[in-house]
Image: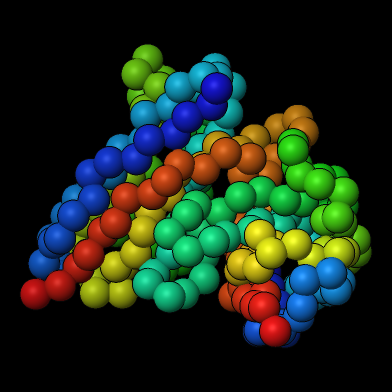
Amino acid sequence: EVQLVESGGGLVQPGGSLRLSCVASGFTFNNYAMSWVRQAPGKGLEWVSGISGDTRNTYYADSVKGRFTISRDNSKSTLYLQLNSLRVEDTAVYYCTRYRLFGEPRYSDFWGQGTLVSVSS
Amino acid sequence: EIVLTQSPGTLSLSPGESATLSCRASQSVSNSYVAWYQQKPGQAPRPLIYGASSRATGIPDRFSGSGSGTDFTLTISRLEPEDFAVYHCQQYGSSPYSFGQGTKLEIK
């Protein structure tokens, strides 16, 4: 059974940092790209960042470029998102998802339950 | 960046009726790489449709998707009580993989 379990969320002040983790199980982790998608309270979904299975390629939304860094440790089947220079508008539930860059299908077919990041003074 | 616009924002229908949800892209989506997700309060999104028209694993055939280019549609026939939720479309044809703002399907 595929499982994605996020952790690392919490309350942080503006300008602060957090590192989110997503532990994957039930599939061959390095065969899949992974992404982070967030949802601000009462709002829609926003794709944040993605990374290829071999870690060579990373992708970012303009809203987080230069502040967030995605990475993965395939030996630990774990995805990370380093959040720096946090802003109030980064407050959201952050979901980890599995997808593919090659082959089919390429959509986000599995999602974790999310971890809440709250940025407030 | 491709901007997705979903309509209507809210759709009020009764169980047994059919729902038609629209997702319009600001430019053509390559390979019709559009997915639809269902989300209920406090839950993660659940994949419904990918590649514009293929149903995800375990999704009943009451859910169907269609479209190409810039116009995509999710149709839900014979609405069941558990279908009332928020529906999101996403394009994954070009980075960044953008989402629409969502359509809320509520019980009339």
Q: Nearer the viewer, residue A54 or B79?
A: B79
- Residue A45, visible in the rendered structure: yes
Which residue is found at the position 38% from the left and 49% from the top? A114
Percent x, y of residue B42: 43, 59
Percent x, y of residue A43: 46, 74
Res B97 quadrant in image:
bottom right
Q: Nearer the viewer, residue A9 or A51?
A: A9
Rendered view: B93 above or below A120: above
Res A12 quadrant in image:
bottom left
Of the 4 image quadrants, the one containing the C terminus of chain B is bottom right
Res B75 quadrant in image:
bottom right
- Residue A30, visible in the rendered structure: no
Q: Nearer the viewer, residue B87 or B4?
A: B87
Of the 4 image quadrants, the one containing the N terminus of chain B is bottom right
Rendered view: B26 above or below A94: below
Which residue is found at the position 65% from the left and 78% from the top? B106
Which residue is found at the position 74% from the left and 36% from the top? B57
Q: Is residue B2 left or right of residue B96?
A: right
Percent x, y of residue A81: 33, 45
Q: Is residue B66 left or right of residue A104?
A: right
Percent x, y of residue A75: 37, 15
Q: State the count of labels.
A: 0
Rendered view: A72 above or below B74: above
Q: Nearer the viewer, residue B53 or B30?
A: B53
Which residue is found at the position 63% from the left and 40% from the top? A109
